[in-house]
Amino acid sequence: MDEDFRSLIDMAEAARDERMIKKAVKSFAHACGFDYFAYLQTEGAEVKTFNSYPETWEGIYLARRYARIDPVVTEAKRRMDMFAWTSDDWPARGSSELRQFRDKAVEHGICSGVTIPVEGSYGSTMLLTLASSERKSEIPKLRDARKAMQGVMAVHYSLKIVGATTLVAPRQALSPREGRCLMWAMKGKSAPETAMLTGINARTVQHYLDSARRKFEAKTVPQLVAIAKDRGLY
């Protein structure tokens, strides 16, 4: 399992576009025994998604704003810890919107899975779900919550960096690891804390932060964080 997580992080960091990121996460999902993946970021009523689900299901999910009632999203926000789920736990009778959600999910092969939630900035929540068409409720291979969180953040950073490259001058564009270290700094983490969370040496973390600081002409890390927030890059 360590190799699968390492591969996910390495492939995400090396990705130059969303297609490469999707390939990395899809490969990780399949290595863990799942059919699909879905990265979901919620901030208030706003929902952003990046997934390998059938396009018809993605369209229905967004059009009907199912994130409001999705049992997986609700449970993820409540627990903020990795958990397994199955559609068998959702309402199977009645004509409620939740029942309709269940029926549509199962119809599109979303029957069980594992979800890894991570608290983001400004009250946002990031979720990485691995889903299967089989009805099961277990977490095969996935046991290390810290590594799971690293995987989610690697996907998040890569999507942010790919999306931000068109918003900043080339000389200001951050490398994937500079972006990862900056993101943890924005969450209030010190260099040693970031080192523990990312598996990067603390001195190397500081090196990446200093490099990012120079690119944005910031004198201190707090100033770097303020600039990044002001520009809406992260």
Image: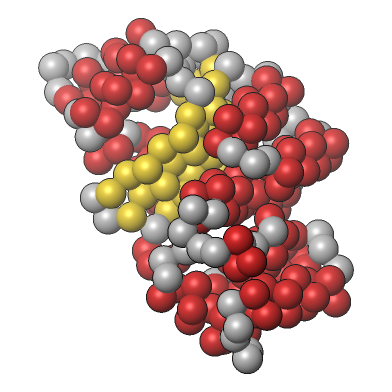
Locate residue 171, reporting x and y percent. Answer: 64, 66
Q: Is residue 11 above or below residue 90?
A: below
Q: Residue furthest top?
A: 107
Locate residue 211, reporting x and y percent. Answer: 73, 75
| Residue at 63%, 91% in the rendered image | 219
Q: Relative to the observer, which residue lies in front, 74 or 34?
A: 34
Residue 188 visible: no
Q: Quadrant of the N terminus?
A: top right
Q: Residue furthest bottom?
A: 219
| Residue at 41%, 37% in the rendered image | 49
Q: Is residue 173 left or right of residue 39?
A: right
| Residue at 16%, 16% in the rendered image | 94
Q: Is residue 153 left or right of residue 71?
A: right
The colour scheme applied to this rendered structure is secondary structure
Q: Is residue 101 left or right of residue 58?
A: left
Q: Is residue 119 above or below residue 205?
A: above
Q: Relative to the observer, which residue lies in front, 61 or 214?
A: 214
Q: Is residue 181 left or right of residue 102?
A: right
| Residue at 29%, 23% in the rendered image | 59
Locate residue 10, reporting x and y percent. Answer: 77, 43
Q: Residue furthest front?
A: 170
Indicate the quadrant where residue 224 lies: bottom right
Count of numbered labels shown in the rendering: 0
Residue 212 visible: yes
Locate residue 134, reporting x and y percent. Answer: 54, 11
